[in-house]
Image (spheres, helix red, strand yellow):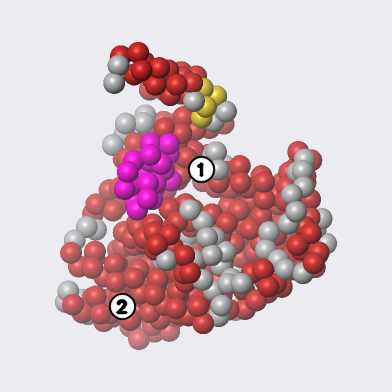
Amino acid sequence: MSESTLVNQQESVLKRKLYGMPIWMLILIVGIVYIATFTGKMPDDDMLSIIGIMFSLGIVLYEVGERIPIWKDYLGGGSLLAFLGGAALEYYEILPVKYSEGITFFYDDYGFQTVFISLLIVSAVLAVNRRQLLKAFKGYVPAIFGGIIAAAIFGLIGGLLVGVDVKSILTLYVLPTMGGGNGAGAIPLSEMWEATTGQSKDAFYSQAIAILTLANNFAILGAVALNSIGKKYPNLTGNGELLKNAEVYLMDEDKIKKEKKEITQFDMAGGLLLTCAIYAMSRLFSKSILPAIGPVTLHMYAYMVIFSALANVSNIIPDSIKQGTKKLSSFFTGPLMGMCMVGIGIAFTDLGELIGVLNVKTLVICAFVIIGAIIGAGLVGMLFGFYFVESAITAGLCMANRGGSGDLQVLGAAKRMQLMSYAQISSRIGGAIILLIGSVVFSFYG
C-alpha cells in the first residue's frame, strides 16, 4: 500500500461522522472534557458537569466495545464495556473520587435512573398492541414461577456437588439471587430473616448482597449468551418481542398506526408529561393509597406498569403521544446508552464485593442458579406462546439481578431495552413472590 493511499484512508476515517460530527471534532470535544475532569477543574455538584463526564467516558467505552472482535458479538459489546469500564474507573479511583460521588448522587439521590427506567417502562407498555398486552401479562407470572422453580432445582444440584447443605443453598443463594434486587429483595429478606429466626440480619445481608452481586454478573453474561443464541437460532427469538405471532393481534386500526408518521417535538414533550403523570400517580399509590396488599409491598415501578397498561388497554392515549414517548425513550437507549451504562457502573457496582466472593463454591452455585432461571423461564414461557430468548431474559434473568440497575445491565447486554416493562414485573412482582416464599422457608429455622 502506497503512502499516499494510507494518508487518504486516515483522512477518510477522521472525516467520518459519529454522533453527528466528524470524528476529529468528537475527539477534540471529548479531550477537552477529559482534561478538565482529570485536572479536577470540573465541578462535582453541577448537573451539566456530571452529564459531560459520563457522556465523554461512555462514548469512548461504548464505541470501542462495539468494535472489538468477539467482544462485540459474544461478550456484550459497547453496553457491557461501558458498564465494566465505569466500575473499574470508580474502584481503582482512576476517576477522581469527587466525580464518582457526584455521579452516584446524580443517579441515585437526584433520580436520573428513575427518569431512565420510567421512560422505558411507559414507552414499552404503550408500544404494545392492547390484545397482545393482555395475553402477554396472563402468561408472564407462570413463566416467573418456572424460572424460580428451575433456579432452585439447579441451585441445589450445584450446591450439593460442591458440598453446601440444602438450607444454605436455598436461603443464601437461591432466595437472594431470585429476589428481584437489593432494595426489594436482599434488604427485606434480611429483615425477615432476623424477625423469623432471631439471627443477625447484618450477617445475612452481607453474604446475600455479595452473592447477589456475583449472580448479577452471571445474569449479564447469560443475557449476552441468549442474544447470541437468538442470532444463531432465529426461531427462538422475537428480537425484542416477547409474544409469538404478534401480528395476529394487530387489528386494522393498529396496522394503520404502524404506518410512519412524523413525530413532532410536541409529541415527545407530551410523552414526557404523560410519563410524569403516571410516575406521580404511582408514587401516590405506593406511598399513601395502597402501599401493600397484606405482606406484599407494591413498589412504585409495579404501579407504573399497571397504570401504563390500563392507559394502553383503555385506548385513551393518542397514538402520536405513544410514538413520542417511544422516540424519547429511544434517545436514551440509542445515543445515550454509553453514558447511561458507564453511570450505572460507577454508581452501583462495587468490584471489591465481586472479587470478595470469588471462590469455587459460590461460582458454581451462582452459575447453576442462573442456568436454571434461564431454562425454567424460557421453557414455561414457550408453553404460553412466548419466545424462549425473551422469556428467559425477562422472567428469568431479570429476576436474578440487582433490580433496577440490574435490569438495565441485563437488557443492555441482551440488546433488548424494549423489554423493560416485563423486566420490572420480574423485579417487583416477582420479588414480592420471593418474599412470600422466603417467609415460609425461614419459618423452618425458628
Give the camera-side residue of 359 and 311.
Answer: 311
254 on left or right of 437 = right
Farthest front residue in view: 2
> Is residue 372 among the parts visible in the rendering?
yes
* Residue at left offset 43%, top offset 39%: 62
Q: Nearer the viewer, residue 9 or 259?
A: 9
Q: Residues within 10 Å of mark 2 (few under 14, many from 20)?
A: many
Which SS class for mark 1? Answer: helix
> For the magenta stretch, what is the residue range?
62-83
Instruction: Say which amino acid is labelled 2.
Output: Phe
- In the displayed structure, 146 sits above or below 428; it is below
Tag 2 residue? 154
- 327 or 172, nearer to the observer: 327
Give the amino acid at mark 1. Met
Rendered-image quadrant of the N terminus: top left
Label of residue 36 in the image: none
Q: Which residue is drawn at 19% across and 61% down?
A: 359
Q: Residue 337 carries which label?
A: 1
Is 123 left, or right, of 238 in this rendering? right
Q: Residue at x 45, y 75 (%)?
A: 377
Q: Which residue is drawn at 39% across and 21% down?
A: 9
Q: Position of residue 38 (x, y in %)?
A: 38, 22
